[in-house]
Amino acid sequence: MELLYNFPLLASLAAIFFAQFIKVPIYFIVSKKLDWSLITSTGGMPSSHSAAVTALSTGVALDHGLDSSIFAISAVFAIITMFDATGVRRHAGEQATVLNQLVLDFNKFVEEAKVWPKKAEQDKQKKLKELLGHQPIEVFFGGLTGILLALFLHYLFMM
């Protein structure tokens, strides 16, 4: 039952769920389309990875202080996670976009070259995941979300 009193863990999990949920209304405001699949998808605004690690670090700082070793560990972990979200994962998503376009172009060529009787089979192909990483602004707002949510939850439950 001690797990239920681990504030950094609870703040981090709350930040993940909040960031994933808030993607739906943000996407709706921007595109006028309601897409509930965003709740379980990677990428998008705000970054739930960034929200989670900053909520974790904020929770650790509130529980153990900024001068603690555990805060140093969580802060470095957060920095690496957010750097990765804007670096490697973002570039992998950009490569997936190019590969998906190549697949579309190839399929168009095949259709023009001859009649493809199994078009329904072609439609079943899954696109590579393009929303792997984040734009820097998505990571920034994910981090801000995590910090503010952890501070709010600490005020609400720990005071």
Image (cartoon, rainbow, N blue to C red):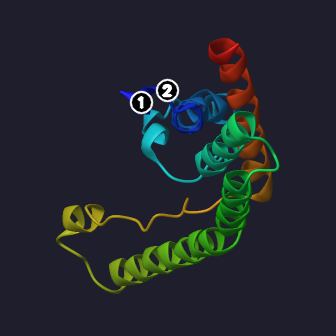
| Disc number for residue 2 | 1
Amino acid on which the number 2 mark rests in the picture: Tyr
Vertical order, 54 against 21 (above or below) = below
- Which residue: 24% across, 66% down? 119
- Which residue: 55% across, 59% down? 131
Residue 86 left/right relative to 66: left
Circles 2 and 1, Cβ within 8 Å, touching? The answer is yes
Residue 150, how many percent across, how many down?
A: 68, 30
Q: Name the one closer to the observer, 105 or 39.
A: 39
- Which residue: 26% across, 68% down? 122
- Which residue: 78% across, 58% down? 136
Q: Residues within 10 Å of mark 1 (few under 14, many from 20)?
A: few
Quarter of the figure with the N terminus: top left
Q: Name the one closer to the observer, 159 or 102.
A: 159
Residue 2 sits in quarter: top left
Residue 135 left/right relative to 21: right
| Residue 98 appears in the rendering | yes
- Residue at mark 2: 5
Vertical order, 110 against 5 (above or below) = below
Q: Name the one closer to the observer, 25 or 143.
A: 143
| Residue 45 appears in the rendering | no
Residue 33, how many percent across, how many down?
A: 56, 32
